[in-house]
Image: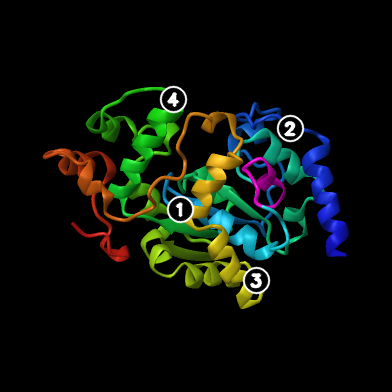
Amino acid sequence: MLNRLFRKVRNLVTSAEPKPAQILVATTEHDSAWGIPNPLDSDIYLISYPKSGNTWMRYLMTYAIWPEIAEVDLVEMAAYFPSFGLQHDIAMMREPDSPCNQLKHRLIKHHAPHDELASQHVKRAIYIARDGRDAIVSYWHFCNQRDGTNISFSDFIECSVKPEYFGPWNPHVSGWLHAPLEAKLILRYEDMLEDTAGCLQKALKFAEIEVPRSAIENAVRRASFDSMRKLEKTKGLNLEILKNVEFVRSGRSGTWLDTFGPHDLERFNQYHGGPIPELGYIW
């Protein structure tokens, strides 16, 4: 049965010969508002502030749940673990035979803050938090490469609080930390670095998915930073919006020290809301 399913998946992914994914051009007001064409109460959203580890967890979970699949780019990933707001991912969510639609809880990547719209749609979530100082440095590199800009880091601290950047860091994290959901799992990026297998096991348990220990160990190896960098350089991630981006960077904690200037921490606290002691983010 699994073999038949994998053949179907290959056909779904390859028969349409998708071009590199584009930002969604919505066909309905509903798609435009939320970016998910057929939301279900049973869906589990994997959410984080940008550059905080949810793409990493997306690969970890996919390789653990479907260990037989080859290395996938972000277009192929759509059939297994779709993301919000991308045309090909939306097509895969609408396709009944997509592997993502065979799970008890469909898994969807999102970056939305916990606002009124999210509160209407999200009942279950895995939220990954990361020290905002590290996240904002990584996000700055990402946005300059993606957009072909040369915004200074100090200026980016201020401009990145705009809604198109998903808003300031502290309200984003705190909003989901205290969101009254039916079910919620909070993970820290720093703990993922220390115990990748343990955090992956927690995420799978939350999604009510059982896999053997060997599948978890294999997923950790396949989704390591070295492996992901190799995938990015050899196969590529195949998203048009990432064609000029070094998406997989160092993945380390504490790199903000190499970037923050004398007054940048003060600016970060002013525009992004400062530390979150509940999660151990204290400065």
Circle 4 sits in a helix, a strand or a loop, which is it? helix
- What's the amino acid at mark 3? Glu
Circle 3 sits in a helix, a strand or a loop, which is it? loop
- Left or right of residue 105, residue 145 in this image: left
- What's the amino acid at mark 2? Pro
Over which residues does the magenta segment extend? 71-80
- In 3D space, how far apart are the residues under numbered discs 1 and 4 (Cα atoms)? 21 Å
Binning the other alpha carbons within 10 Å of mark 4 as few (below 14), some (14 to 19) or many (20 upward) gives few
Q: Is residue 19 above or below residue 171?
A: above
Among all residues in the image, which is located at the extreme bottom?
213
- In 3D space, how far apart are the residues under numbered discs 2 and 1 (Cα atoms)? 26 Å
Which disc, if any, is residue 53?
Answer: 1
- In 3D space, how far apart are the residues under numbered discs 4 and 3 (Cα atoms)? 39 Å
- What's the amino acid at mark 4? Asp
Q: Nearer the viewer, mark 2 or mark 3?
A: 2
Binning the other alpha carbons within 10 Å of mark 2 as few (below 14), some (14 to 19) or many (20 upward) gives few
Among all residues in the image, which is located at the extreme left?
262
What secondary structure is the magenta-colored segment mainly?
loop
Circle 1 sits in a helix, a strand or a loop, which is it? loop
Query: In the rendered structure, which disc, 1 or 3, sits on the residue that comes first in sequence?
Result: 1
Circle 2 sits in a helix, a strand or a loop, which is it? loop
- In 3D space, how far apart are the residues under numbered discs 2 and 3 (Cα atoms)? 31 Å
| Residue 22, horizontal then vertical, whole percent | 62, 29
Which disc, if any, is residue 147?
Answer: 4
Which residue in the structure is indicated by mark 2?
18
Query: In the rendered structure, which disc, 4 or 2, sits on the residue that comes first in sequence?
Result: 2
- In 3D space, how far apart are the residues under numbered discs 4 and 2 (Cα atoms)? 23 Å
- What's the amino acid at mark 1? Gly
Which residue in the structure is indicated by mark 3?
208
Labelled pair 2, 1 in contact (Cβ < 8 Å): no
Question: Can residue 206 be seen at all in this image of the molecule?
Answer: no
Query: In the rendered structure, which disc, 2 or 1, sits on the residue that comes first in sequence?
Result: 2
